[in-house]
Amino acid sequence: MASDEGDDPYLWLENLDGDDAARWVRDRNAETVAALTGSETFSGLRADIRQVFDSDERISYPGWCGDGFYYDVWRDAAHPRGLWRRTTLDQYRRPEPEWDVLLDVDALAAREGENWVWSDVHRLRPGHQRVLISLSRGGADAAVVREFDLHRRSFVGDGFTVPEAKSRVCWIDEDHVYVATDFGPGSLTTSGHARTVKRWRRGTPLSEAEVVYEGQPDDVEVFASHDPTPGFQRDFVVRSLDFYRAENYLLTAADELVRIPVPEDAQWNVHREWLVIRPRSPWTLDGVTHPAGALLATRFDAFLAGAGEMTVLFTPDARTALSYHVWTRRHLILATTVDVRSRLEVWTPGDTGWQRAPLAGVPEHDHSVVTDTDPDHSDAYLLASAGFLQPATLRLGQVGGPVETLKREPAFFDADGMAVRQFFATSADGTRVPYFVVGDPAATGVRALLTGYGGYEVSQTPRYSGAIGRAWLTRGGTYVVANIRGGGEYGPEWHRAALRENRPRAFEDFAAVAADLVTRGITTPAQLGIEGGSNGGLLMGVMLTRYPELFGAVVAHVPLLDMRRYHRLLAGASWMAEYGDPDREADWAYLREYSPYHNVRAGRPYPPLLLVTSTRDDRVHPGHARKMAARLREHGYDVSYYENIEGGHGAAANNEQRAFLWALTLEFLWQRLAGRPGERLIPRQSAVPDGTTQVVS
């Protein structure tokens, strides 16, 4: 087993510009495409999935920016890169609204000869006539930022422009912005983000921008923001120490930094006079210990002065967790989950304290999410509700007022005879782990697709997927979502239970769900396929190498697999708070025990594996997937590999590519779980460092 990168024979595959590595990728892609995409079944799957992604009947989820318009970015077959557009509420209510197109990204890309992918937009408030648009090349995290005039529908020729980088920008006023970006050598952290934030004045070069704050090279990033709310204008500076801890400051008019005394690991936000705090670990304040995952509210100015009454708005319990909170103009909406089932409520501050009430318009059985509010001007909210078998509905509500249905999505597959069931598996240490099973409840021993994530306090909640429905469920398959530790389904403690040296708890949870599916007769190991992406791709790699007997096939999208070098590749250094530091002997001692790349062994019953990644992924380096494929091939295992040349961390830059990758994934799983264990669709080969291949008999 290699314990150091000096022993790694496949380091050359990390070279994104190397001819040998590029040739290796082309060869692997050609093999996979030839083996999986030539049938009528694949063509039909891809067409069915593409039809869902491009359907005109999809809900166009709009966003508000305080000017009365509904904004969105719409992608379809005619506009694969997207249209940034807006309309009025009266128009949006109609079956076919009239949209005002502000920017055609396809036309812009053609005109400028760039592979632009829409990334983000930052609006100037108040006024709303100027915005900062972020466009990435090929879907990468790094983006170019350009100022755009909404009135003229054009970029501002001499406006604010930030070259390609992983930047943060924020308007201060029409003539000033905060910018944290790559200012040149020494200006980035080891995570590849800005360690300096500056105040930039219109009409001056970026190089002359005024330094506001500078962090340390080992920080994750530094950034600043401005709150333009009339009567409550404030400026903030954040120094991210790691993925979960930060120093937070109020920046005064005299450019003095005043530390906001919230815990370093707390999530917080300020709305008008209010400060809301969610600690990630127990916090003792004035003799009272508030548990991790609680939500507290106090007046910001009083808290900063060392006074102020703290009101507890939410306290977690064994089954209930806070997912998020969002402000309207006068109210605070809390989204909680009870055993991964959503609940929404409203808290309202008043002269006699805070009052609690349910949020109107929330369906009892669907999973509901507040997609936007208008906190500058009104108490309106947009509410999206859906379920595994229930297409989405978008509603417009007013806190304390009426709720109307704006849009209903059609069913993209026939769910007749299907049901959603929730079960609990028992993990190795006795923990109850919830999971959802979707499909025919009477079916037994069928192909099943199990997915999970288990990291970064990210919850896996019910959602409607026309692609999974058409390409998996209607073919007779069962779909399963595991809510394992490391996620946020039960709050920060559920996440902390699988942090760093405790990561194996997440793996044990997923294995327990797999075993429980078999015990219940829902599927068999030979017919159980699994899929996960990013951190979920790490989960897949561990399942392959540690629990191979539980599964019939594995798919890992944009996976993290080399836990010895992950912190030296792209954004990897920012994740050490989640996994540990491989350069520390104590951390590497537990990381090496599960690092998939370092635990490949000869003669093991590994199920077939499909690895999918992107050359333009500047978050998780494609070298993880490349090297894992090469090492498995070296040992003669059945491994398929596909690398998209664009797409960033999503591995796809448009709906056509997304449809191709999901068809590839589901066709691979369907074939490999078909009970033909002896069939080889791709020759087993051994990769050698000159980029050639050697066929192994």
Image (tube, helix red, strand yellow):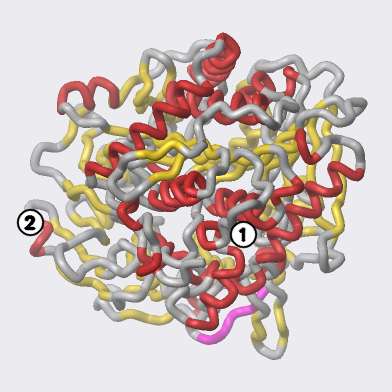
* 495 to the left or right of 435: left
* 387 to the left or right of 16: right
Residue at 36%, 60% (x, y): give it. 569
**What amino acid type is highlighted by mark number 1?**
Glu
- State whether residue 379 is above or below residue 263: above
Q: Which of 556 and 47 is in front in this view?
A: 556
Asked if the stretch drawn in magenta spans residue 625, the answer is no
Write down the quadrant of residue 39 in the picture. Answer: top right
Disc 2 marks which residue?
205
Secondary structure at numbered mark 1: loop
Residue 145 visible to an observer of this rendering: no
**What amino acid type is highlighted by mark number 2?**
Pro
Tag in front: 1 or 2 = 1
- State whether residue 632 is above or below residue 562: above
Query: Of callouts 1 and 2, which one flags the residue occurring earlier in the amino acid sequence?
Result: 2
Residue 457: give its label: 1
Magenta-highlighted residues:
306-311
Q: Nearer the viewer, residue 53 or 240?
A: 53
User: Measured from the top left, where is residue 401 in percent x and y?
Assistant: 69, 37
Secondary structure at numbered mark 2: loop
Residue 34 visible to an observer of this rendering: yes
User: Measured from the top left, where is residue 235 in percent x and y?
Assistant: 35, 66
